[in-house]
Image: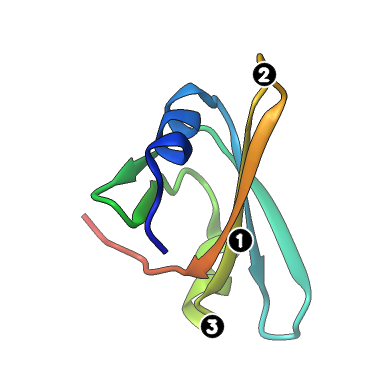
Amino acid sequence: MELTKEIRASIDKSVLCWLATISTENIPNVSPKEIFTSYQKDKIIIANIASPQTVKNIKAHKSVCVSFIDILVQKGYQIKGRAEIINS
């Protein structure tokens, strides 16, 4: 999915996002993330800071959902897609 200019602007204004994943037992897991940004026209990069369950879940099931909100205008987005772990 291409991230529109409006969505990328909202990402830039948001200070927190929530990343939802699925465990191998099909149990949902939602984890707040403070460091995230858009990249190119169709990717969102989210930092992995002390999130072992999130990483484990992504390795098992690539499907994720990320949601974020610009609290000043009370408008947000929910983006569904596939995740990839990128090591340093």
Label 3 amino acid?
Answer: Ala
Residues under numbered marks 1 and 3 in contact, where contact means CB atoms less than 8 Å apart? no
Q: Position of 41 compared to 22: left or right?
A: left
**Dot placed on the residue nearer the N-terminal end, 3 or 2:** 3
Q: Earlier in the sequence, mark 1 or mark 2?
A: 1
**Disc number for residue 47:** none
Q: Secondary structure at mark 2?
A: loop
Residue position for label 1: 65
Separation of disc 1 and disc 3 at Cα? 15 Å
Which residue, given by chain and number where applicable, does mark 3 sit on? 60
Mark 1 is on which residue type? Cys
Q: Height in image: 10 above or below 39?
A: above
Mark 3 to mark 2: distance in Å? 36 Å
Residue occupying image coordinates x 40% and y 37%: 8
- Judging by the rendered image, the residue that carries numbered circle 2 is 73
Q: Where does residue 49 sit, x and y in percent of width and height?
A: 47, 43
